[in-house]
Image (cartoon, rainbow, N blue to C red):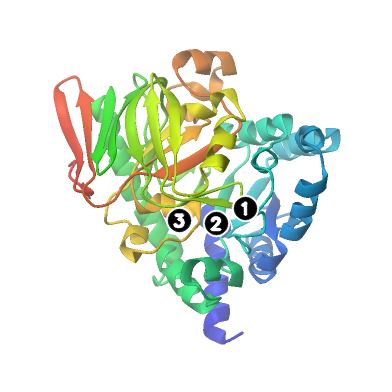
Amino acid sequence: MSSSAEDRLDRFADLVVRVGVNVQHGQGVVISADIAQLEVARAVVEQAYVAGAGWVEVAWSDGPIRRSELTHATIETLTADRPWALQRAAEWTEQGVATIALVGNPDAGLFAGIDPAKLTTVRKGEMSARQQAAMSGEMRWTVVAAPNAGWAAQVYGEPDVERLWTAVGKAMRLDEADPVTAWRDRAATLASRAKALDALQISELTYSGDGTDLTVGLIPDCRWTGGSVTDPAGITYMPNIPTEEVFTSPDRRRADGVLRVTKPVVIAGQLVEGLRLTLEGGRITDVTADAGADVARAQLDSDEGARSLGEVALVDRDSRIAQADTVFHNTLFDENAGCHVAWGQSFPFAVDGGLELSPDQRYAAGLNSARVHTDVVIGGDGLTVTATTPTGKVPILEDDEWVLP
């Protein structure tokens, strides 16, 4: 590895550790990674220890092994909770472990031919435990993408990892003199946007663009979030790097209209293209797509809450990922190329006191509950977003440009 590539990898890992999960002295860290991401995982482990981690563990995965499991195991086995996994999740939560997920699919076609019902299976108890720990702030967490040859081939048609690293590095601000400071500045900008949105007391958002005419109701006094979040101990962290969005959770009961997804979306490892959705009374009632509609439908049918929205997010054309004009075939990146919504799980911190509410109370308030959370981009050239407020209509974005002061 050249010295410049080694320096870039160190800057990547340092950013993940110091800004992503903000590792504290003596803290435990768990990293999930595919074996194709070995080099990146090693760098993150090193920087975690440099930052003072007490211990670091890597939970390895491997695509072909997962394909064998999906091919031969029954749906009953694939959905059965494992007591040891539940106990481990509980212990990690109790200890305040920080979790880092390295993503970037190294083999997009690996799961071709697998039953969509199997692809979308989850272990309910284990998923719920992880979601609860993450959404409550009991465990600081971050998701970042690690370039690899397979992912590069999906983006460029050839395994040009260096080209992908250049694009990822720009999106992650690794080209800045001090990426950590650059991200703290960007987080401050996004936080100021969130504060401005809070002040509007928005009751509805309307997204209008080519193929999209969607109105989504918001929960009274909901809270917008952008950039970093803060855990109960007052420690800031950034769940996604890169992030260019401000977001909140809508009222799951109030969404009507149609939307056209403007970027391909990866669901259970499968690419879904040309996705179009119809919503009525807060529920997704119709799904069509140019490719992969069966996978989208399978996920929507996998959980009672999957057909309701759990997130609405605003991203403008100044996003570094929008400016890259590249389909990354990775939700972490592609969702930050434009405004998006997500079906599935809501964020409890999107309402005042939401973290202290019981699941039933959150649901009664309008927050959604589901074992999935899938973001789909509806933004891009021509998109307009308008807020309904107590004083009338207020434009937020016009032709994909942020116009709210």
- 128 vs 108, nearest the viewer: 108
Query: Residues under labels 2 and 1: Cα distance?
Result: 6 Å
Is 15 left, or right, of 324 in this rendering? right
- For mark 2, does the 10 Å Cα neighbourhood hold few (<14), some (14 to 19), or many (20 or more) residues? many
Which quadrant: the N terminus?
A: bottom right
Amino acid carrying mark 2 in the image:
Val
Residue 214: percent from the left, percent from the top? 30, 31
Task: Give the SS element for disc 1.
Answer: strand
Amino acid carrying mark 1 in the image:
Ala
Q: Residue at x 51, y 78 (%)?
A: 162
**What is the total number of numbered labels drawn onto the structure image?**
3
Residue 192: percent from the left, percent from the top? 29, 42
Q: Which mark is residue 144?
A: 2
The residue indicated by pointer 1 is 101
Say which label, 3 or 2, has the lower sequence index: 2
- Outermost residue toward the left in this view: 392
- For mark 1, does the 10 Å Cα neighbourhood hold few (<14), some (14 to 19), or many (20 or more) residues? many
Q: Which residue is drawn at 48% across and 33% down?
A: 343
Is 385 left, or right, of 162 in this rendering? left
Q: Which of marks 3 and 2 is in front?
A: 3
Task: Give the SS element for disc 3.
Answer: helix
Q: In which quarter of the image is residue 285?
A: top left
Q: Which residue is drawn at 83% across and 35% down?
A: 82
- For mark 3, does the 10 Å Cα neighbourhood hold few (<14), some (14 to 19), or many (20 or more) residues? many
Q: Which residue is drawn at 57% across and 28% down?
A: 370
Q: Are the residues tagged 2 and 1 within 8 Å (C-beta)?
A: yes
The residue indicated by pointer 3 is 333
Report if residue 56 is visible in the image. Answer: no
